[in-house]
Every structure is written in structure tokens, then in C-alpha cells.
């Protein structure tokens, strides 16, 4: 996860997972919208474990019925997203990520790995896929 990113969000080369300061997500949403990306906000407030995280992602990203609620299923879903068409790319904005990071560090680390894997896959398809996680202590975007 990086604090530095190029503001060319419409460029697949900008795909990745970025840590941003709380309060920056609204500005990033506007930049992503202007770049033609589909904006998906994921509220992690109160999310303290893998089970809650997977349920939250499933609901807020409208995963298809039968989503397996495990890490492999999450990875598969984020590398597919055919039910959530976005010809210009994707911007996932994770609000209140600090509680998950503090309460379930291994699950948080796995989430970051899966998001990074998805970003690399979409970049290979030449489609932007950026994830912004708001975390206290992050440099301003």
C-alpha cells in the first residue's frame, strides 16, 4: 500500500492500493468521477474481523448470489466484476479502515494483498482499478 499516487486516475498505470488521510475520499471520488471511473464506497465502520469484512464487501459491491465468503472468492470476485460494469475503470473508496487494521491486522493485510492483486490484473487489462483506504496518520492525497 502506498501513500503516493499519480492523479491520472483514468490511466491503468495508476492502478493500485493507496493509503489516504480521512477526509480525502470525497475529493478522490470527484477526481475518479471526472476520470470516468465507477465509484464504489465501502464503509468499514465497525468492521473488526474477516467475517464482517466479507459480508460488508459482498453487500456494498453487490456480489452475485453464491459468493463464497472466503478469501479466494473475494479475489475471484474482484478480478471479475462483470456484474458491475465500468468501461472506464473502478475506484473503491474504503471509509473508516483504521478499526479493521487495528482489530484484525492479519485480515487487513490479506485484504491489501487481494486488492493489490486485483489492481494488477485490471492494469494488465488496461483498465484502471484504484483502491483508497482512509487511515489516520496518512499523508494528504
Image (spheres, rainbow, N blue to C red):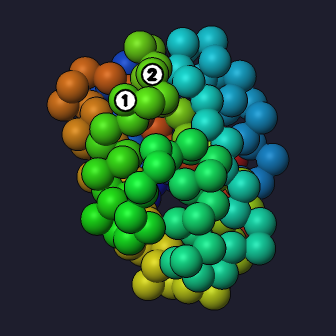
* Res 12 label: none
Residue 29 coordinates in the image, percent (x, y): 68, 29
**Disc 2 target residue:** 85
Whether residue 2 sits left or right of residue 119 in the image: it is: right
- In the image, residue 84 lies at what x, y percent? 48, 29
Which residue is nearer to you in this view: 124 or 2?
Answer: 124
Residue at x 39% of width, y 35% of height: 81
Query: Where residue 7 appears, x then y in whole percent?
Result: 52, 26
Work out which residue is located at the far right of the displayed protein and give it: 23
Q: Do callouts 2 and 1 mark residues in contact (Cβ within 8 Å)?
A: yes
Disc 2: CA contacts within 10 A as few (<14), some (14-19) or many (>=20): few
Secondary structure at numbered mark 2: loop
Q: Is residue 139 above or below residue 112?
A: above
Q: Residue at x 77, y 35 (%)?
A: 26
In front: 128, or 3? 128
**Secondary structure beneath label 1:** loop
Label 1: which residue? 82
Mark 2–mark 1 distance (CA, rounded to whole Å): 6 Å
Amino acid at each position: 500500500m502506498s501513500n503516493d499516487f499519480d492523479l491520472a486516475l483514468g490511466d491503468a498505470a495508476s492502478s493500485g492500493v493507496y493509503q489516504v488521510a480521512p477526509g480525502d475520499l470525497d475529493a478522490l471520488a470527484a477526481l475518479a468521477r471526472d476520470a470516468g471511473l465507477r465509484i464504489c464506497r465501502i464503509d468499514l465502520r465497525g468492521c473488526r474481523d474477516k467475517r464482517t469484512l466479507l459480508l460488508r464487501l459482498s453487500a456494498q459491491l453487490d456480489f452475485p448470489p453464491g459468493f463464497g465468503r472466503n478469501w479466494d472468492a473475494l479475489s475471484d470476485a474482484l478480478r471479475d466484476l462483470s456484474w458491475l460494469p465500468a468501461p472506464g475503470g473502478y475506484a473503491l473508496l474504503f471509509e473508516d479502515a483504521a478499526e479493521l487494521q487495528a482489530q484484525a491486522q492479519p485480515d487487513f493485510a490479506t485484504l491489501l494483498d487481494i486488492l493489490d492483486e486485483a489492481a494488477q490484473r485490471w492494469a494488465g487489462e488496461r483498465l484502471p482499478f484504484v483502491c483508497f483506504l482512509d487511515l489516520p496518520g496518512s499523508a494528504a492525497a
